[in-house]
Amino acid sequence: MKMLIAAATGAVLAVMAFAPQASVLADTAEKQTPSGICYSEVGASIDDYIAERETGLASCEVCVFDGDGEIYTGYYGYSNIEDSVLADGETVYEWASTSKILVWVSVMQQVERGNIDLDADIRKYLPDGFLTKLQYPDEKITMVNLMCHNAGFQESMYENQEAAPGDVYGSLEEAVRACECYQAFHVGEYTAYSNWSTALAAYIVECVSGTDYVTYVHENIFNPLGMDHTSIDPNQADNPWVAAKRQELMCYERYGDPAYNQDYGVCLYAVQLYPAGAAIGTLDDLYKLGQALVNEDCPLFEDNATRDLMFSATSYYGDTDIAKNCHGLWAQQRKVMTLGHNGNSAGCTTSLEFDPVSGLGIAIMTNESGETAFTNGIPVMLYGEYTDKEGFEGGAANAVDISGTYYCTRSLCMGSGAATQYMAQVFPLAANDDGSYST
C-alpha cells in the first residue's frame, strides 16, 4: 500500500483530503447491502475503510447507487499530490477496460434493433475476407464468442500501442485490421481475454449501424444519459473539456513503504483499439451509466427484456452452473452474484459493479495503476464474500484435486512471439493436506 501527501500540505489539507466530500440520501436507512450494511451507514463504512488505508491512497472516488439513484458519493485524496489539488467532481479518470461496457451495450442495442443476431457468424457483418488469421476457418464465431472472450484469439502485442496523437490510426477499421491477431484456439475452447476481439465487436457495430463508433456512443449512450463529461475518442477529440482536464490529472503508485512509490506524471497514452479501453471521464458520468443499467426502466434499451437478456449468463466455470460472463459483463461470485467490468491503464484503475437483483451498484475511480485495495476491497465490503453465500458449506474434503501446471491463455501462442507464453506465465499448483493450494 501507498503513501500520500508531502508534509508541506499541512494538517488541514490532510484532513480535507481524507474527509468525505460527499452526499448521502437520508431516506434509505431501512435498506441494507448484501453484506448487511444499512444504506445510511454506507458512507461511514467507506470512510473508515479508506482511512485505514490512507497511506496507500493517491485519490479515490466512490459512488454507491441503486435503481432509485445515488446513495453515497465520496471524493478522497489528491488528483495532484505535488500541488495539493484535491480530487473532486470535475476530476477525470481513465476507464481503461471498463470502457468495454460501452461496446456491449452498443451490441445489445443493435440486437434489439434487429441488426445483429447473437448466434450468427460474425463474418456475416464484416467485409469479405476481413479475418485473415483464422486457424479454424470452418468454425463459426458468434458475437457471444466475442463477448465471452472465447473466440480463440490470442493476445496482440500491438493492441495497446502507446501512440502519439499524430500516430493514431485514422479509423477503427484501420486499427482492427492493423492489429489483427492469430486465432490460436478452437472457438469456445478457452476464455482468453482479448482487447482485439472487443474492438472487432465495436467495428461490427459500425458496420451494421452505418455510424462510426465514437459518434454512435455519443448518440446512443452519452447523450441520452447526459454523460457530458466523458470522452471515448483515443485523442479525446470528441470532448475538449475532458482533454483539458485529463492533462491536470497526475498518476501514481503508492505503498506503505515510500521506497516503492512511483510518480508517473500525466501518463496519458492513446489506445489504438480505443473501444476496448480509451474512455475518460468523471465519476458522475460513470455513475450515470451504472444507474441506467440497474434502473427499473433502463433508458439504454427500448425494452427491458433486452437488458434482462444482457444480464443472463453466456459462459460458465467448467461444467458448473456458476456464471463467468453475461454478454460481456464479468460475473463476480460474492455473497450475491454481481456483474460489471474493471479496468487498469498505465495510470488509472476503475471499476463499475452492480447486483442485478437488488440494483445496488458501485463506481470507483483511482489515479493509481494496478490499484486493488479500493477497486476490489470496497465491493467486497458491500457485497460480501462468496463464503458468506447462503448454503455455502466449503466442501474442501470432497473437492476435485486441480493440481497441475497452468499457463495464461491471454498470451502469444502463435507466431514469432510464441515463446513468451512460457515467460512468467506458468503457474504450478499443488494441493495441501488442508485442502488449500500452493503455487
Image (cartoon, rainbow, N blue to C red):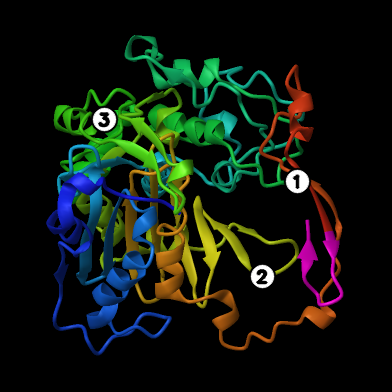
Residue type, label 2: Asp
Lower sequence index among marks 1 and 3: 1
Residue range (magenta):
430-439
Q: In this picture, is 384 found above or below 413?
A: below
Real-space CA distance between mark 1 and mark 2, rounded to the nearest whole angstrom: 17 Å
Q: Tell me the quarter of the image containing the C terminus.
A: bottom right
The image quadrant of residue 203 is top left
Amino acid, disc 3: Thr
Q: What's the CA distance linking mark 1 and mark 3?
A: 35 Å
Residue 321's label in the rendered image is 2
Front-lying residue, 270 or 227 = 270
Q: Residue at x 63, y 24 (%)?
A: 181
Under circle 3, the secondary element is helix
Question: Tag 1, which secondary structure?
Answer: loop
Which residue was labeled with disc 3?
Answer: 215
Circle 3 packing at 10 Å, graded few (<14), some (14-19), many (20+), is some
21 in relation to 144, above or below: below
Q: Residue at x 41, y 22 (%)?
A: 172
Q: Residue at position x 24%, y 43% from top?
A: 79
**Direction from residue 90 to residue 4 in the image, left or right:** right
Is residue 282 visible in the rendered image? The answer is no
